[in-house]
Amino acid sequence: MPLTKTSQKFNASINAFTIGTGDKAVTMGGENVLPFYTFDAPIENAPKIGAEISDLGMDKNVPGIRDYYAGAEDFTELARRASAIPGVDFIAFALDAADPNGEDRSVEECVEECKQVAEGTDLPIVIIGSKGIEKNETLFDKVADALSGKNVLLMSAREENYKTIAASAGLAYSQKIGAESAVDINLAKQLNVIISQMGVKPQSIAMNVGAASAGYGFEYVVSTMERVKMAALQQNDNMLQMPIVTPVADEVWNVKEAVVSEEDIPEWGPQEERGIQMEVVTASACLASGSNAVILRHPASIAAVSKMIRELI
């Protein structure tokens, strides 16, 4: 009996969302099918990959990362090196040193770092804020001003600070806003609604619905992404039609499989290989579940995930 194929193309679609300017600008979203379902309809904008660099410098404990950035003396050179990794679509700069419970680097210093990154790349830029929720309000305001005209994505606006970030970065400086929620479809939708009510267009909002490394409560991340995608496409919920951007690297390179040395647990094998495998597996699962972009750290991980995307789209 011949197989009668049923198409799952939907009438609704994910918002097309662009960061960066000129020839190097990238657009994510825009699809009206489930992830990688190119047999149902073409996917014009393939999932994107960001290379993460930090203002704390690169990870000295991972040879592949350490060696790739060896000799880079400032953030301009770090950005230049990251931009040269095959398969990279944008640069994600994490302001880790701004954390009030860490180095507590000043807002002025962080703004100067962001300017240096912008000098080192013509790729789109994503700025990942510190863990200081209140500090991010002032930080993002100043960064949005300093990078005016660059069409950057500022991650992440949370329930506690979205008003200031949406008003300053999103409205005053016309930058893109990343709405961060904690692995819950209702929280994700609520945040999109209230940011939109501030006057930010839905097409200027991306979602970070939460992240985790594979094996660490990751099933909640997957189920949330899948529910968001189905609500957006099947139910035409326009407050869940924002594309999803997932910061994978920070989650993966902090779990024990990626940080415990081979000397401590020989049967686990080489530490760096474990980290790469965890990053690739986590990123692949996020993309298959509905993420439109993933942020990675290791050049080998970026190469593997980029190849997967090319072969599936």
Image (spheres, rainbow, N blue to C red):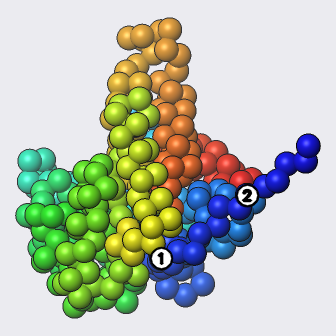
Horizontal and vertical percent position of residue 56: 28, 51
Does any portion of residue 159 appear in the rendered image?
yes
Name which of mark 1 and mark 2 comes first in the sequence: 2
- The amino acid type, in three-letter code, at marker 1 is Asn
Residue at 23%, 58% in the rendered image? 187
Q: Where in the figure is residue 154, as x and y percent of width and height?
A: 30, 71
Provide residue 73's location: percent of width, then percent of height.
38, 57
For discs 1 and 2, the disc positioned in front in the rendered view = 2
Q: Amino acid at mark 2?
A: Thr
Nearest to the observer: residue 42 or residue 132: 42
Secondary structure type for disc 1: loop
Question: Considering the numbered disc 2 on the image, is that residue within a helix, a strand or a loop?
Answer: loop
> Residue 44, percent across and down?
66, 73
- What's the mark number on residue 6? 2
CA separation in Å, label 1 and label 2: 25 Å
Q: Which residue is mark 1?
A: 15
Relative side of 124 to 161, left or right: right
Q: Residue at x 55, y 63 (%)?
A: 48
155 or 187: which is nearer to us?
187
What's the residue at 19%, 75% (across, down)?
194
Q: Nearer the viewer, residue 197 or 173?
A: 197
Q: Height in image: 141 above or below 61?
A: below
- Relative vertical location of residue 294 with respect to residue 169 in this rendering, above or below: above
